[in-house]
Image (spheres, rainbow, N blue to C red):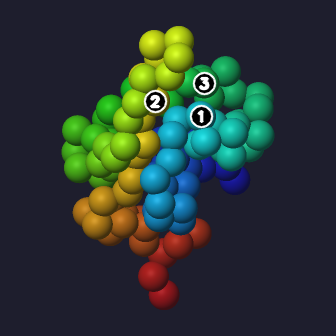
Amino acid sequence: MKLPLKVRILEYAIEKNSPFTIDEALHDISPEYADERFCNYKFMEKLMRLFLGVNVLKEGHYELDENGELHVEYQITDFGKGYYASIPGHEKA
């Protein structure tokens, strides 16, 4: 069974445990959700803001590219790592 995208992003961030961009997350996760139209940059950006707002993720390095687009790196917080056991398949025994 496929995890809801929001939960899968949380799992991705915890398991990666290093900075990542939305583009990197989409590249790694989108094949699992190829039949889902909501697996796109705009929706992923909303989820990142949600996770930032509740201290699950934090912003790291950010920069503007040559086209004036902002690229932000995100990283899981210690608080966010605490949710790992609540993700289906990762329950503590």
Amino acid type, label 2 = His
Does dot 3 land on a helix, a strand or a loop? loop
Q: Amino acid at mark 3?
A: Asn
**Pick the front one: 81 or 37:** 81
Left or right side of 48 for 77 = left
Instruction: Residue at the far front: name it.
Output: 66
Does residue 87 appear anywhere in the picture?
A: no
Q: Is residue 55 left or right of residue 43?
A: left
Q: Which mark is residue 23?
A: 1
Residue 68 can be seen, yes or no:
yes
Q: Residue 92: where, in percent of width, then height?
A: 45, 82
Q: Nearer the viewer, mark 3 or mark 1?
A: 1
Task: Identify residue for label 2.
Answer: 71
Looking at the image, tell me whether mark 2 or mark 1 is earlier in sequence order: 1
Q: Is residue 79 above or below residue 58?
A: below
What residue is at 51 percent from the left and 40 percent from the top?
Answer: 21
Mark 2 residue crowding within 10 angstroms, few (<14) / some (14–19) / many (20+) = some
Where is residue 63, by image quadrant? top left
Q: Residue at x 58, y 69 (%)?
A: 89
